Image (cartoon, rainbow, N blue to C red):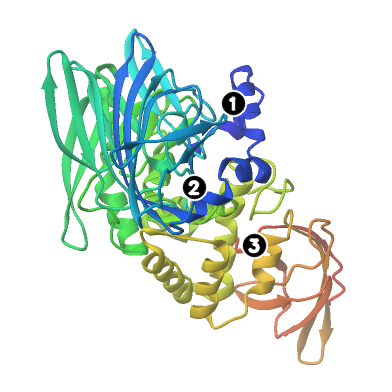
Amino acid sequence: MKNKIEFISSAEKNINLVMSLKDINEDFIAEYNVKSQRSLDVLHYKISIELLPDEKKIKGDVTLTIKVVNPDENVLSLNFYDNLKINSAFIGSKKVKYDRSETNISIYPDEKLLDTILVRLIYEGEPKSLGFGSFNFDEINGKKLIYTLNEPIFASTWFPCVDRPDDKALADIYITNDSSFVSLSNGKLIGSTINGNKKTFHWKTYYPISTYLIALYSGYYKSYSQKYISISKDTVDLFCYALPDKFEDAVRDFKGHERYLKTFEEIFGFYPFPKEKYSVAQFNWVYGAMEHQTITGIGTDFISGMKLFQDMIIHELAHQWWGNAVGPKTWKDIWLNEGFSTYSEALYWEKQSGYDALKTTLTGKFGTFNNGTLYNPDKNLFSTLVYDKGAWVLHMLRKEVGDTTFFKIIRNYYDRFKYKNASTKDFQTIAEEFSRKNLSDFFNQWVFKGVGIIEANFQYKTEKINNGFKTEIKLKQLQNGYDIYKFPIDIKFVYENDSETKEFYVTKREESFTFESMKKPLEIILDPDKWLLANFEINKSNDGR
């Protein structure tokens, strides 16, 4: 997800959004994802949704194929908001009893469960729109547009599910609306059928998907398509869907995806969903874009026809690798989605224009990040802490282990956890495996425990010695968020006609280095290539003659 929330949080229209998300904490998630759900593994969703735009209601018929880890389980707990009226509930072909809370349904089997069961719910009503707007009956210029955005835990506002990011399943999604509407979803379009004045579109996923990434869009869409030949030699279908008055602009913005895809395939590995597609669809979310698996939603305000939001487009595409193919094990690990995709923006520009372009991109994402730890952020799952500090942490890891090793880590992380879910500890394990280094200090200070960034006072003094000059360098860490950061730092010594760069390693709160040179340094530059998330205050005492 790429959003403007950090920059418009004072806007009145954003107050309700922020308030509706601030209570998504560990206590809420523990109540929402009850412990008994751990005995359920959803293998497949058959989701049939009939849209009734004039009434702003839906009719749903959803069947879950569930592997039951504990067949003696006497209650099946699913996430499903209670404003939707259930007409019938079945296990297999038998009707069953159930209880409801605001966010959950408890289903009571009347006999011992088989290893794999079918649970079917038939329901109707007006879905709630929570979080970022989980279900929306909207209009653009008087034309109806229906769309969803489930992240992080609001899929259950419109279909019953086990709404955890680590419970991936396959899905068949049937969307029925007036025959004048085009209805879109994840995966591959299998076909459409007309029944009177209604049209049903059937979409199918061939790769597992998390519930927060399942989406539907229904509107008066026009489409543009092209083909991308993957490095794997697969042919990937590309689509752009937009409403008529934005269609030409959307197509202009969309063109370039072949280059984006090729770049990410070269860096990360093959595009993860070649049997399905990659597509973008216009929706009316005012805060940015959302990386629904194989069908990214792009807010109307971000379709310019001039590629003004190209980084957003690149960011959402990167999510197909980071977040979608490799999913987070829990929402505590959200930085593995957003930090990776944000750093992918910088990697894309580095590939196109060189390292200076990467530096420019990251410099624009610099902050002090004093609002919590990167792992398990306690203030906001979607703040610049998660996005931008996450990107910087990957950049610093690259410096810590070296370029060749860093990209081995990234590619192997992708290969090992593709179509699965990974935790921050999983990523650390792979980083240590391929770097052959103990990275506990790095991950503790930047991910698990440290708050903020490096703040340091830097002093140096140069004096004449027999065979040249000696420079004494003193660095004192001043930050409050973490006691002692340990890090490599490049220091550039600039002479009259040339320069040289040396790497030092900081391990103490107050550190001293000595460097001897034949020529007198005229200037000393810390971290000239911008590898560190740090603020340095530099003082010079130069007594050399």
Along the viewing direction, whichever of 522 and 216 lies nearer the viewer: 216
The residue shown at (56%, 62%) is 424
Q: Earlier in the sequence, mark 1 or mark 2?
A: 1
Q: Residues within 10 Å of mark 3 (few under 14, many from 20)?
A: many
Query: Residue 471, how many percent across, how many down?
Result: 79, 78
Q: Which residue is under mark 2?
A: 164
C-alpha distance separating marks 3 and 2: 34 Å
Quarter where residue 270 is shown: bottom left
Horizontal side of residue 126 vs 497, given as left or right: left
Q: Which residue is under mark 1?
A: 17
C-alpha distance separating marks 1 and 3: 34 Å
Q: Report the label total.
A: 3
Compared with 207, 516 (above or below) is: below
Q: Which residue is under mark 3?
A: 532
The mark closer to the camera, 1 or 3, is: 1
Q: Earlier in the sequence, mark 3 or mark 2?
A: 2
